[in-house]
Image: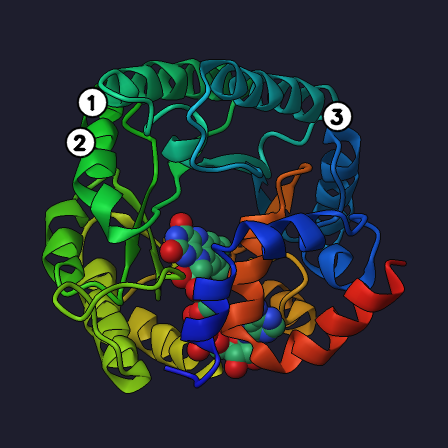
Amino acid sequence: MPLLRQPLLMLARSEHVKNAVSRMPVSSGIVHSYVPGETTEAAVEATSRLVDDGLVVTLDYLGEDTLDVEQADTTVQAYLDLLEALSARGLTRKAEVSVKLSAIGQFLPEIGDKVALENARTICRAARNAGTTVTLDMEDHTTTDRTLAVLRELRKDFPETGAVLQAALHRTEADCRALAHEGSRVRLCKGAYLEPEDVAFQDRIEIDKSYVRCLKVLLAGQGYPMIATHDPRMVDIAGSLASRYGRAQGTYEFQMLYGIRPTEQQRLADTGETMRVYIPYGTEWYGYLMRRLAEKPSNLSFFVRSLVSKK
Ligand SMILES: Cc1cc2nc3c(=O)[nH]c(=O)nc-3n(C[C@H](O)[C@H](O)[C@H](O)COP(=O)(O)OP(=O)(O)OC[C@H]3O[C@@H](n4cnc5c(N)ncnc54)[C@H](O)[C@@H]3O)c2cc1C
């Protein structure tokens, strides 16, 4: 684990830090490099630009950990507005949505799982009516079982709903086996959360080895793997494994985050790969930004300059 990742992720939990950082405008350099804007319009514009360049996208209305029913409802409405706007622009064949269950009520005491499931159903229904799909993002390990349980329920009516699995967790290779069946869309990422050693690999090499084992399971399986990584080694290995398992382009896809390695995103799309860009948007960009900074501490000086200049 890079030296700064753990302290940065811990610092991110401080309310003081959150208040100071959240006052930065979305237009400030560091925020804007990862988040194209706060509004539906900004998200649709970013989608349109990427689609024109031959890429596809998944959109995330930023927000997480809500304990407020109204906030959860606002998030659901934001997704409905987004799907309508994408539909009006003819973009839903190229754009799906990513949803965090904690943003739509999962942490509400006692009723959380029920509310999150109902809210997710509402978004899945709107997505299907618009001609697209939903992927459930995965949050920290304390939510994995609950999120997979909601996924199972959702897939009874919306089997096209995608899941995310995190190679950092010890359990993930087994989860990949369980989800590598026909019709199952699984995004494999390394995992962005600080996790304890009883449940997660701590060493980057161990996480990478787990990523490769999981890739093998997904690419050898019957589902639709979504290979979410910016790591050049993982991208190369995924390409070789796809050939080894006789996977044609279009039977799996690559995914990367908005603003990270855009040249590589374009290169993969130009070679005929399906390249999906994850576009986060909205005012609640703090948690997302801090996870991205923790992954790339060399961005810190850029970040501090943005904080000081408040541009
Ligand atoms: C489409 C998508 C969806 C995701 N969804 C989830 C999710 O639901 N749950 C979850 O826990 N995690 C999610 N993640 C994040 C993921 O778990 C990792 O934290 C993140 O992708 C960094 O890991 P990496 O595979 O890119 O490899 P790393 O080894 O971290 O990075 C490889 C290289 O990528 C570049 N890079 C990586 N991060 C950055 C950055 N922040 N800024 C600039 N360059 C960078 C650098 O060149 C770096 O050397 C998602 C990632 C993607 C791409």
Q: Depth check: 59 or 281 in front? A: 281
- Other residues around mark 3 within 10 Å, as few (<14) / some (14–19) / many (≥20): few
What residue is at 70 percent from the left and 54 percent from the top? Answer: 20
Res. 273 visible in picture: no
The amino acid type, in three-letter code, at marker 3 is: Arg
What residue is at 17 percent from the left and 46 percent from the top? Answer: 179
Real-space Cα distance between discs 1 and 2? 6 Å
What residue is at 21 percent from the left and 74 percent from the top? Answer: 201
Counting residues from the start of the chain, the first of labels 3 and 1 encountered is 3
Does the Cβ of the disc 3 residue fall within 8 Å of ligand 1? no
- Please say if the residues under marks 3 and 1 sit with CB atoms less than 8 Å apart: no
Real-space Cα distance between discs 2 and 3? 34 Å
Q: Which of marks 2 and 3 is in front?
A: 2
- Please say if the residues under marks 1 and 2 sit with CB atoms less than 8 Å apart: yes
Give the image quarter of residue 58: top right
- Other residues around mark 2 within 10 Å, as few (<14) / some (14–19) / many (≥20): some
Res. 239 visible in picture: yes
Q: Which mark is residue 89?
A: 3
Q: Circle 3 — which element?
A: loop
Give the image quarter of residue 266: bottom right
Residue where numbered disc 2 is placed: 149
Q: Depth check: 90 or 70 in front? A: 70
- Other residues around mark 1 within 10 Å, as few (<14) / some (14–19) / many (≥20): few
What residue is at 44 percent from the left and 85 percent from the top? Answer: 3
Rendered view: 24 above or below 219: above
Q: Circle 2 — which element?
A: helix
The amino acid type, in three-letter code, at marker 1 is: Glu
> Residue 257 appears at what percent x and percent y?
57, 58
Residue where numbered disc 1 is placed: 153
